[in-house]
Image (tube, rainbow, N blue to C red):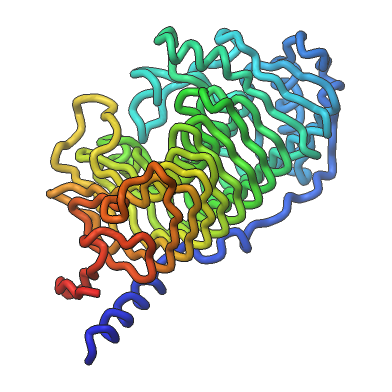
Amino acid sequence: MPVALVLLLALSCLIRSYGAGNVCDLGRRPNTRPHSVSILEFGAVGDGKTLNTLAFQNAVFYLKSFADKGGAQLYVPPGRWLTGSFNLTSHLTLFLEKDAVILASQDPLHWEVVDPLPSYGRGIDLPGRRYMSLINGYMLHDVVVTGDNGTIDGQGLVWWDRFNSHSLKNSRPHLVEFVSSENVIVSNLTFLNAPAYTIHSVYCSHVNIHKVTANTSPESPDTIGIVPDSSYNVCIQDSSINMGYDAISLKSGWDEYGISYARPTANVEIRNVYLQAASGASISFGSEMSGGISDVVVRDVHIHNSLSGVAFRTTKGRGGYMKEIDVSNINMVNVGTAFLANGSFGTHPDSGFDENAYPLVSHIRLHDIVGENISVAGEFFGTKESPFTSVLLSNISLSMNSESPDDDDSWRCLYVEGSSESVVPEPCFELKSFESSYGRAVAL
């Protein structure tokens, strides 16, 4: 059988095995709640100065009684509603009317301090505990955060200053976080100035995030937009995200804690999103990925003004895997490095990690991608102990800017194996061959 036909058959087998299916097409619309109350009924004042934490807490407590009656809606009318952190409940819709703004208090005393996540062992910024998210859901079922393009503003500047000045007492809070919850919808809202992450789903299933806008300052340190974390059946679509670090980042735990917790992120679909990441990647995988990441489909994405386009990050001691990932129909403009895969990226939570826990990175497909004003086409740096394998590139055309290296240096590779077809500029030698399942390299 001709070599070209053998290669084509091998590639087609791999391609069929990729992806999350049509997760977004399985998403559901929120149920109409038979009961609705306004936050005004609980004494809230929307003047941007009065603290309304107790009003939100009392409203949610009251609405718990409707859980077995079809659930209820908490209505937030136009106004500026200052609050500290509060919890949601199951079978609840939090609805923000147009011109309604939930403002996060800038006083740390208004944020509850909670234990670190078990798959991380510590906070993301500091060892020890962390501030609870502004809007928090724990072990919930059927919960919706939506509106008529209302706004949730984290007023994160004070947190960013504390982070930069090393004056934090606990790790920064997120804007919205769901933990161990299922059937979650976040939609039709604008999120501003998250202290750290904007929307964080961890240990969750059936999460649908659509028609959201999330923005922070380009100078905001380590802020991330949407973070599916040890979660499965996640859809992110029809959204615009502009962050200081990463726009969308898939994670699954940190070193020995993530390995022990063993909860992967899987069956994720990302489509029709507009992304910008000032100092990070528009779409990133890792670097905290010790529980594994697999079966991810990314398509119809517009990436602009970002340090990196698509990034895969890990390091020795992480363990875990990143595999069966399909990225296609991407348009990049003004991007530093279009594709980045780094096997020596990130820090460790403590000294307890296993130096011999080598991550697996394999079966990554990047195809049907165009780029304009790109500085570096790709950097793929695996490790000697665990090279990246089965990286498949096809139908990629990148227009390099005047500051980019010569075509011979526009791809930088080490300890990576894969194949390519119709890729401009021409990729490095390591990505011109295909490692078959029988262990034989086939040159293109």
Position of 259 compared to 54: left or right? Answer: left
Q: Quadrant of residue 230?
A: top left
Q: Is residue 218 visible?
A: yes
Q: Residue at x 62, y 20 (%)?
A: 85
Q: Quadrant of the N terminus?
A: bottom left
Tell me: residue 2, above or below residue 322.
below
Q: At which x and y percent is residue 353? A: 20, 33
Report how many numbered discs are placed on residues in the image. 0
Residue at image coords 69%, 28%: 152
Q: Quadrant of residue 46?
A: top right
Quick check: 375 left or right of 83? left
Does residue 183 appear in the picture of this structure?
no
Q: Nearer the viewer, residue 105 or 216?
A: 216
Q: Nearer the viewer, residue 234 or 88?
A: 234
Q: Residue shown at 27%/79% (left/top)?
A: 7
Q: Is residue 233 left or right of residue 110?
A: left
| Residue at 60% from the left image edge and 47% from the top image edge | 274
Measured as percent of width and height from the top left, residue 197 is found at: 52, 31
Residue 391: image location, x then y, percent: 30, 61
**Residue most toward the front?**
402
As drawn, the residue found furthest toward the bottom would be: 1
> What percent of the width, then of the height, locates residue 291?
33, 45
Q: Quadrant of the C terminus?
A: bottom left
Query: In front: 399, or 327?
Result: 399
